[in-house]
Amino acid sequence: MPQLPTEPGPDPSGDGVVLEVLLVAPGGEPVGRSPIESVLVKFPADRSEPVSRVQVVPEPSIGIPPVSEDRVVSAYVEITAENFLSGELIVAQVTLSVEKAWLKANQIHEWSIEFSRFDEAARRWKPALANRVGEDADKIFYSLVVTDFSLWSITGSTEPPPVICRVDDMRISPVRLDEGEAVTIGATVTSLLGERAEYIAVLWLNAALNSSQTLVLEANESADVEFLLRPKKGEYEVRIDQLAGRFVVEGEGLGVFLWIIIVASVALLGGGVWWFTIGLRRGRGAMSIGRCASQRLLEIAYWPGRFIRWFFLLFTNLRRGGSRR
C-alpha cells in the first residue's frame, strides 16, 4: 500500500496541521533542479510559510563513510529547517524523484530506492525504503516519512530490497468511544534481519499522515508500538504499515446526561408516588379522597416535567454556545 502524499490542511482528528514547506536553495532563491519534489510537515499548531533549505551536495564531507558497497548513489541532498525548530516537527513526508535514464544506465531496480539519513551521533547511514507513488516521461516519484532533516543520500541497487520488518497484530481500543476520550492504536513490529535495524512506524489517519515512532530492534527482536489519540467526533480509518482498521467517536457525554435524566426522574416519581399514597391514607371521605387523588396526580407529574424541561433548555443553550465558537 503506497504512502501517497498527504494533502496540506488540518489533521483529521484536530491535532495539528500539515503544511507544505517552501523549498529554497542556500542563497534563498527557489530550488531549481533537485531530486526533492516536495516536503510536507506536520506541526502541533498553525504555522505560516515554513521554509526548508535544500542543497544538492556533489560529495559528502571528508570523514563521512560511503553508504554501502552494493548500492549506487544517485545524489546527496542536505535539508535544513529555516524558520522552525526541529522540535516543532511532529513528522514529515518527503516526495523525491529519480531519473529513468539513471535507473536504466545503472540497471537499478525501481523498487530498491532508499533515502538514507546520516546519523551524526552514530556516524553511519540509516536507510529508509521509499515507496513508488508515480511517474512521468522522465522520472519516477517516491514518497517516504522522515522524522529529521539532515544529510541524506538517494541510492539504488540492482536487486529488490529485502523485507526489514514484519508488522502484525493491529489493536484498536476502544473501537467506539465518546468525544474527549482516548483511543489507542497499536501493532507488533518484528525485525527479520540478523542485525540491529531501525524502523519508523507511521500512523495514517483517514489516509493522512498523523504521527510516527522510531523503533530500534535487535536481530529478530519484536516490539510493540502504540499511538494515543483524542480525536473529534467522526468515523476514522487508521493504518500502520499494511494493517488497517476503523473506530468511531460519538458525541461528547450524551450517555451521562441521559442517565442523569433517568435517575432524577425515577427519584422524583418515586417521591411523588409516596406523597400520593400518604395523602390517600390521610384523606377523609370519598369526595376528599377523589379531590386529593387528582391534585396529587397533577403534582406527581408536575415536578419531573419541570425538571426535564429545565434540563433540555440548559442542554440546548450549551450546544448553541458551542456552535457559535
Image: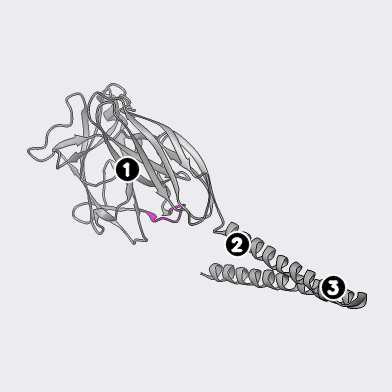
The residue located at (39%, 56%) in the rendering is 16
Labels 2, 1: front one: 2
The prevailing secondary structure element of the residues shown in magenta is loop
Could you say which quadrant of the image residue 197 lies in?
Answer: top left
Question: Which portion, as a residue range, is magenta?
Answer: 11-18
Can I make out residue 88 in this image?
yes
Residue highlighted by disc 2? 257
Can I make out residue 137 in this image?
no
The residue located at (36%, 60%) in the rendering is 45
Alpha carbon distance from label 2 to label 1: 38 Å
Q: Which secondary structure, mark 2?
A: helix
Q: Which secondary structure, mark 1?
A: strand
Pointer 1 or 3: first along the chain: 1
Using a 10 Å C-alpha cutoff, classify the residue at mark 1 as few (fewer than 14 neighbours), some (14 to 19) or many (20 or more). Answer: some
Alpha carbon distance from label 1 to label 3: 70 Å
- Mark seen at residue 293: 3
Using a 10 Å C-alpha cutoff, classify the residue at mark 3 as few (fewer than 14 neighbours), some (14 to 19) or many (20 or more). Answer: some
The residue located at (70%, 73%) in the rendering is 306
Q: Amino acid at mark 3?
A: Ala
Residue highlighted by disc 1? 213
Q: Is 188 located above or below residue 323 in the figure?
A: above
Residue 1 left/right relative to 115: right
Q: Quick check: is 239 in the magenta stretch?
A: no
Alpha carbon distance from label 3 to label 2: 32 Å
Please tell me which residue lies in front, 12 or 175: 175
Q: Which secondary structure, mark 3?
A: helix
Q: Position of residue 139 (x, y in %)?
A: 34, 35
